Image (cartoon, rainbow, N blue to C red):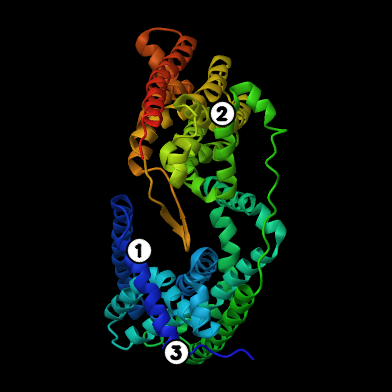
Amino acid sequence: MVAFPDPNHAVRIAANELRIAWRTLRGKSTAQLASVGIVVVFGAAFTAAAAYGAYLGGRGLAENPGELSQLVSLVPAGLATITLFMAAYLTVVQLGDIDVRDGYLTTVPARDVVGGLLLSGYVRAAGLFTAPLLVASAAFAVGAGSPLAFPLAALAVLALTATAFLVGFPIGVGIAYLASRSAIVARFKTLIGAAAFLAYFGLIVSGTFDEAIDPILGVAQASPVSWYADLAVLAVVPSASAAKAGVVLAGSVVLGAGGVLASVRLSERRWYTESVEASERETDSVSSGRLDRLVGRRPAWVARKSWLRARRAPIKLVFVAYPAFLLVTPVQASVEAGHVTSSLPPSIALYGAWMTGAAFTLNPLGDEGAVLPVTAISGISGRDFVGGLVVASAVFGVPLTVAVAGGLAVLSPLPPVALACTVVAAAVLPVLAAALAAGVGTTYPKYDATSISRSREVVVPSMWAFGVYTLAFLLTAGIATAVQVPAAAGALANLLGVADAAVHVGALAVGVLLAGILATVSVRIAVRAFDDYTA
């Protein structure tokens, strides 16, 4: 028989979780705190915009209290959809589990732990927009000139977000439980995550995200979820149904209670059932013998070590995907044009090269972690160490960049010379990027782990390394790709009084030369840093 959590235990556990989250936030680096500050600024701007919109809405409804408009009923549909999806996602990655779980489960029942997670999770997930909406509720009441409108609107916001969260939380726990029980999911979770990201990115860049979300909003708007609007405007709009408002409140209580019980049951099954382990593939030297012959035994060993670490902890490479959103503009331009535009292949070549350099060589010393002293005295030279990291990046980055950028270049209206230069850039720049990143990464190393999710910390490159590498690479290699766009090449050719083909080839040569000079200097810096390392 599933029982409800004990309120006293749940509140104490929730308070402890929020205290830990606050201490973690205070302990973040300056760059991370700056990003939090940006979020706060945007939150304040959203609060002001929501309050002003609610004020205008309240005044408009007070002046023309007709039937509930489609816009008013759309608000709870959108809010419920966002809260539910956010609750499910954050539960999977963070909110559905707790640090030192075994210690909690030996002192209090699992249901009390779940209760604490639900309370703290609601504050951390739904609180991002619940607080601004409560401010907007007050502005709505002021605009409508009805003091009673504020408590009703605030009640509607709290009931809706709490109910959606309590429905989304067990969905997230269920997904996490199924993932822990499926050997296939455990083995291919990286590919599944990458596919999900690519699908999301595809919806964004293709401009079809709205089309994908519209059916969900339509279903929510046609359901009793829209009745929360009746509750919010009950004191302002005479046509608002008190019966619907009462029913939706009762429904919130029933669904919320069901969500709590489902969360307890699923969490118990997840915590008390042994998880499957992904089977490790043998890292045999048979397939790696070819690499040994090509680059040498020691560089090949460094490369294989980097690949093995990435396979075991792929989350440490997630940061290389963030700049992919800069491709939104050229991809959208191609989607709108109905064909591959001339700017897309060079953009892909540049991003692919940047990604190659950032993957394995942007924090050479920090990635070694606690074994860095052992690696330093293992007899491997700095040249072999840095060369192995460059090989680790290039083996994957070069073929991928050439395949994607070259394939798109063939489908684009790029002239033959620009097409050839783009393919050459896609083949050469990834290697130079990896070499350039090595020197920057050893100059600005980062040894401390960064918290990615609950109980998951990984070492990622420092913000200084990230910024310096990106700037240096764009100012050099960017020349080789940017001028391959016919419009840019034509403008530069007219300015210099030469043929477009000469500009394409010249820009490639200049960009590769500058990037090569920086890469050569960076490799020397990285080699010296490793050879001179002392614990």
Quarter of the image for residue 489 reads top left
Residue at 48% from the left image edge and 88% from the top image edge: 245
Q: Position of residue 253 (x, y in %)?
A: 52, 89
Q: Nearer the viewer, residue 71 or 16?
A: 16
State how far apart marks 2 and 1 are (Cα): 40 Å
Residue 88 lies, with reference to residue 492, above or below; the image says below
Q: Label 1, label 3: how many angstroms apart (C-alpha)? A: 26 Å
For the residues carrying marks 2 and 1, which lies nearer the camera in this image?
2
The residue tagged with tag 3: helix, strand or loop?
A: helix
Q: Amino acid at mark 2?
A: Arg
- Name the foreground residue: 237 vs 234: 234
Q: Nearer the viewer, mark 1 or mark 3?
A: 1
Please, what is the three-letter code of the amino acid marked with disc 1?
A: Thr
Query: What residue is shown with label 2?
Result: 298
The local crowd at label 2, few if under 14, some if 14 to 19, many if 20 or more residues have their Cα within 10 Å, is some
Q: Earlier in the sequence, mark 3 or mark 2?
A: 3
Q: Is residue 266 visible?
A: yes
In the image, 417: left or right of 141?
A: right
Q: Farthest top residue?
A: 498
Q: CA distance from mark 3 to mark 2?
A: 59 Å
Query: For the residue marked with disc 3, what is the amino acid?
Result: Pro
- Judging by the rendered image, the residue that carries numbered circle 3 is 7
Q: Nearer the viewer, residue 451 or 139?
A: 451
Q: Earlier in the sequence, mark 1 or mark 3?
A: 3
Is 369 situated above or below 52?
Answer: above
Q: Disc 2 on helix, strand or loop?
A: helix
Write the residue at 46% across / 8% down.
499
Give the image location of residue 127, x and y in percent. Answer: 39, 72
- Does residue 344 appear anywhere in the picture? no
Q: Which mark is residue 24?
A: 1
**x%, y% of residue 111?**
54, 84
User: For residue 288, what is the image quadrant?
Assistant: top right
